[in-house]
Amino acid sequence: SLGSFEFAPRHLGLKLAITNAEANGSGIVQIYEAMDVMDLSKWSLIGKISPYRFADNSAGGNAVPCLAWSQGRYDPPTLAIGGVGKVGVHRYDETKRRWTEAFNVPTTSSNAVVQDISWAPSVGGSTQHIACAEGRCIQIIQIASATVQPQGTQTLDVPSDCSRCEFNVTGKLLVAGCDDG
């Protein structure tokens, strides 16, 4: 079953990344592109990030519940993918013509499920930020823009389970949707 889907930023063209939500799923992330924007009934599979392995969840599978595209206009296509046990950042390598993992960061606990992930808009700074909603906390990953390597993480505790997170248009304000409203 469909876990998450997100359209790529406008500058990358009409692309769509899709994950699976089944607990016994394959862990595959598929990227599609509409080759003819006037005929949206035909989408071509242009890439796979497969298999995306996570620490086994209680059902023993590789569910991939969320993903987010980097908004950086001058960066190659980059996806942050969250699941059980880790958050991975993958970049499209033009020379190899395939997606490769740039790095991964463990979640706050080994069995934490990343419910939502949000990439802050790129406003020309030397760092980028990814927020991950993981139960009763939000993990913020800081990335060096030039090297695409993590520079550190920060954990924010929230009073109840957090299922959504999103940065504002400037990337300076983070909003979280929790079970207690």
Image (cartoon, rainbow, N blue to C red):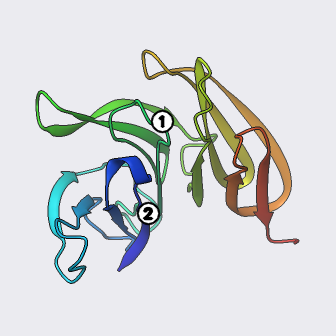
Q: Is residue 72 above or below residue 31?
A: above
Location of residue 131 in the rendering, given as x and y in whole percent from the top left corner: 64, 44
The residue that appears at 41% across and 37% down in the rendered structure is 89
Considering every residue shown, the one lying at the far bottom of the view is 41
Q: Which mark is residue 72?
A: 1
The quadrant of the picture occupied by the C terminus is bottom right
Locate residue 61 relative to residue 41 in the image: left or right.
right
Q: Nearer the viewer, mark 1 or mark 2?
A: 1
The residue that appears at 37% across and 74% down in the rendered structure is 22
Location of residue 150 in the rendering, given as x and y in whole percent from the top left corner: 52, 22
Q: Which mark is residue 123?
A: none
Q: Quadrant of residue 15?
A: bottom left
Q: Amino acid at mark 2?
A: Glu
Answer whether residue 112 is visible to the viewer in this image. no
Asked whether 84 or 174 is in front, the reply is: 174
Asked whether 26 or 94 is in front, the reply is: 94
The residue that appears at 47% across and 64% down in the rendered structure is 65
Q: Is residue 74 above or below residue 50?
A: above
Q: Amino acid at mark 1?
A: Gly
Instruction: Residue under label 2, please give it.
Output: 6
Label 2's element?
A: strand
Location of residue 16 in the rendering, given as x and y in whole percent from the top left corner: 33, 63
Locate residue 15 relative to residue 72 in the image: left or right.
left
Q: Is residue 149 above or below residue 159?
A: above
Location of residue 75 in the rendering, given as x and y in whole percent from the top left corner: 39, 31
The quadrant of the picture occupied by the N terminus is bottom left
Q: Residues within 10 Å of mark 2 (few under 14, many from 20)?
A: some
Locate residue 20 relative to residue 107 in the image: left or right.
left
The residue that appears at 50% across and 33% down in the rendered structure is 105
Answer whether residue 1 is visible to the viewer in this image. yes
